[in-house]
């Protein structure tokens, strides 16, 4: 299960300020990874050694400076469905408003763990004012000032106590593939193409994420878990809700999986929302396979797949090393091929490269093209090691890590990708002082 903390509340109580504070320390890390654009409403946070996702649900609602009650309701319902823990933010300087009551009513009925966060407690005087929030019936308020950060430590101490510490332990050792993509791209059709007739040889796994249908597929020598994000209620939703739902579902599914099968519509090409999902997977360091679906609708020329691939890769830069499969969920063309590719990406993601081999291959490359000297300082890389983490991470030990440029890190990453197959897998390289 994913650890997702959702921030809810009416406008102007300080949700995005709190979001920024919680995701701040991670932001620096993510931003330094070249080219990774951050979602302003979704980020990672870490406290007491536990990593979790933070979502500012208010940020996903249109026109959030002047929104209607209906929008607030929508936001809170989503948080109740998708989050593990909800932070209900209130503004102590304004007390309880009618909108706050709407939120509180929904949260009381929802079954999720809620923390009442009394924000803008900037000084001692204001501490006396938070008492009224008890009346909401959602427990003791936590006094914080999102601007200064005071009180957030105590809040986080209690938040992480309610999160799943064993999140990194694989519940199942079989590969988990999430089928993600925008509405109507063909996710349900793909799942049906895979499972349709074989429903009888398929077992649903109990205890997996509520609301997303996880199915174990065991046949023809394959064994994997499919996480379906198509959603049950999608047919009844209007367009904008659909988009919102698909974002929330994607986040959850991406966290739960090892590899995403990102479906894009062949007729539309790779669009901004597809790239957002791609970046989410990259940020979470999950494997990616891109399926260009509805390929049956495209008129083919001799170079159509090659040209198409190139266009996609340009938009994915700098992480271009991603398998692309042209599928038709309708005719089942290359549907099994897509699964085989996903299995390969899964293998790429979990493999470890022997230290000896890693050094034998990479040290000569480094010697041949060392980092450029900066201000007369020469960087010497002495030793390389893979960390025992869930996604490929490599540490380069050297004398002056601070002098290694982003460009050189990219050079190293590209050589690593050439030498060892990491297709579809985000890898991380670090320089560390020996
Ligand atoms: P949101 O609409 O709930 O996301 O609220 P914002 O995070 O945009 O904050 C609304 C306003 O409250 C902004 O002007 C913030 O600077 C201010 N604000 C947020 N947190 C605090 C706080 O702890 N103390 C004070 N005094 N102002 C705050
Ligand atoms: P979802 O919203 O992503 O689950 O998309 P659906 O699986 O419901 O598909 C949306 C529509 O696209 C349906 O009418 C499907 O029949 C159609 N569709 C899905 N995959 C393909 C495909 O590969 N080729 C064609 N021509 N149509 C497809």
Image (cartoon, rainbow, N blue to C red):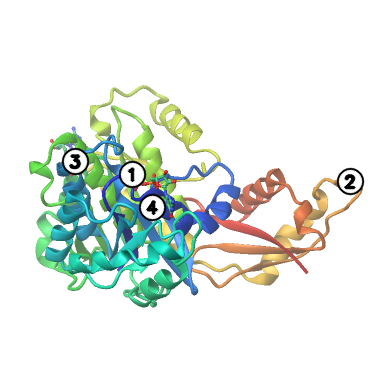
Sequence-first disc among 4 and 1: 1
Sequence-first disc among 1 and 2: 1
Q: Is mark 1 within 8 Å of ligand 1?
A: yes
Against 367, residue 279 (above or below) is: above
Q: Residue at coordinates 87% horizontally, 53% vertically from top-left? A: 378
Which tag is nearer the camera, tag 3 or tag 1? 1
* 108 or 251, nearer to the observer: 108
Q: Is residue 212 visible?
A: no
> Which numbered disc covers residue 341?
4
* Mark 1 nearby-residue class (10 Å; few <14, some 14–19, many ≥20): many
Q: Kindly indicate whether the residue at mark 2 contacts the one at mark 1 (C-beta within 8 angstroms).
A: no
Q: Name the residue at the front extreme.
A: 125
**Alpha carbon of mark 3 to alpha carbon of mark 1: how far?**
14 Å
Q: Which residue is mark 1?
A: 59
**Alpha carbon of mark 2 to alpha carbon of mark 4: how far?**
46 Å
Find numbered disc 3 in the image and state the secondary structure of the residue it sits on.
helix
Find numbered disc 1 in the image and state the secondary structure of the residue it sits on.
helix
**Alpha carbon of mark 4 to alpha carbon of mark 1: how far?**
35 Å
Counting from the top left corner in percent of width and height, residue 7 is at 32, 56
Q: Residue at coordinates 21% horizontally, 63% vertically from top-left? A: 214
Quadrant where the N terminus sits is bottom left
Sequence-first disc among 3 and 4: 3
Q: Residue at coordinates 19% horizontally, 59% vertically from top-left? A: 81
Q: Which residue is mark 3?
A: 241
Left or right: 22 as drawn, with respect to 202: right
**Quarter assignment of residue 269:** top left
Q: Which residue is mark 2?
A: 375
Q: Kindly indicate whether the residue at mark 1 contacts the one at mark 4 (C-beta within 8 angstroms).
A: no
**Quarter assignment of residue 82:** bottom left
**Alpha carbon of mark 1 to alpha carbon of mark 2: how far?**
44 Å
Q: How many marks?
A: 4
């Amino acid at each position: 299960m994913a650890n997702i903390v959702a921030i809810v509340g009416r406008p102007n109580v300080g949700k995005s300020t709190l979001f920024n504070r919680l995701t701040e320390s991670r932001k620096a890390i993510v931003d330094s990874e070249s080219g990774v654009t951050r979602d302003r409403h979704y980020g990672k946070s870490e406290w007491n050694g536990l990593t979790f996702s933070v979502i500012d649900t208010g940020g996903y609602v249109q026109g959030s400076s002047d929104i209607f009650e209906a929008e607030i309701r929508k936001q809170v319902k989503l948080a109740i469905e998708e989050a593990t823990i909800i932070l209900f933010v209130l503004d102590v300087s304004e007390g309880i408003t009618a909108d706050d009551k709407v939120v509180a009513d929904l949260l009381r009925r929802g079954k999720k763990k809620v923390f009442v966060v009394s924000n803008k407690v900037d000084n001692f005087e204001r501490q006396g004012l938070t008492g009224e929030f008890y009346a909401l019936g959602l427990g003791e308020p936590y006094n914080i000032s999102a601007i200064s950060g005071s009180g957030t430590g105590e809040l986080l101490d209690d938040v992480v106590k309610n999160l799943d510490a064993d999140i990194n332990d694989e519940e199942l050792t079989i590969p988990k593939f999430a089928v993600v993509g925008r509405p109507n791209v063909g996710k349900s059709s793909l799942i049906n193409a895979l499972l349709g007739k074989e429903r009888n040889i398929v077992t649903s796994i109990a205890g997996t994420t509520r609301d997303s249908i996880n199915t174990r597929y065991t046949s023809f020598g394959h064994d994997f878990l499919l996480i379906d994000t198509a959603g049950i209620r999608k047919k009844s939703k209007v367009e904008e809700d659909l988009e919102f739902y698909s974002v929330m579902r994607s986040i959850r599914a991406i966290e739960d999986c090892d590899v995403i099968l990102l479906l894009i519509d062949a007729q539309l090409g790779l669009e901004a929302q597809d790239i957002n999902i791609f970046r989410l997977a990259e940020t979470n360091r999950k494997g990616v396979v891109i399926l260009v679906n509805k390929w049956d609708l495209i008129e083919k020329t001799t170079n159509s797949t090659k040209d198409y691939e190139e266009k996609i890769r340009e938009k994915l830069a700098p992480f271009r090393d991603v398998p692309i499969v042209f599928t038709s969920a309708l005719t089942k063309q290359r549907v099994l091929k897509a699964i085989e590719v996903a299995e390969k990406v899964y293998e790429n993601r979990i493999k470890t490269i022997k230290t000896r081999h890693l050094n034998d291959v990479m040290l000569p490359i480094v010697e041949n093209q060392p980092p450029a000297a900066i201000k007369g300082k020469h960087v010497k890389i002495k030793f390389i090691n893979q960390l025992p983490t869930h996604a490929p991470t490599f540490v380069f030990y050297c004398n002056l890590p601070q002098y290694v440029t982003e460009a050189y890190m990219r050079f190293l990453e590209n050589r690593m990708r050439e030498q060892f197959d990491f297709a579809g897998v985000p890898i991380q390289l670090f320089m560390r002082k020996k």
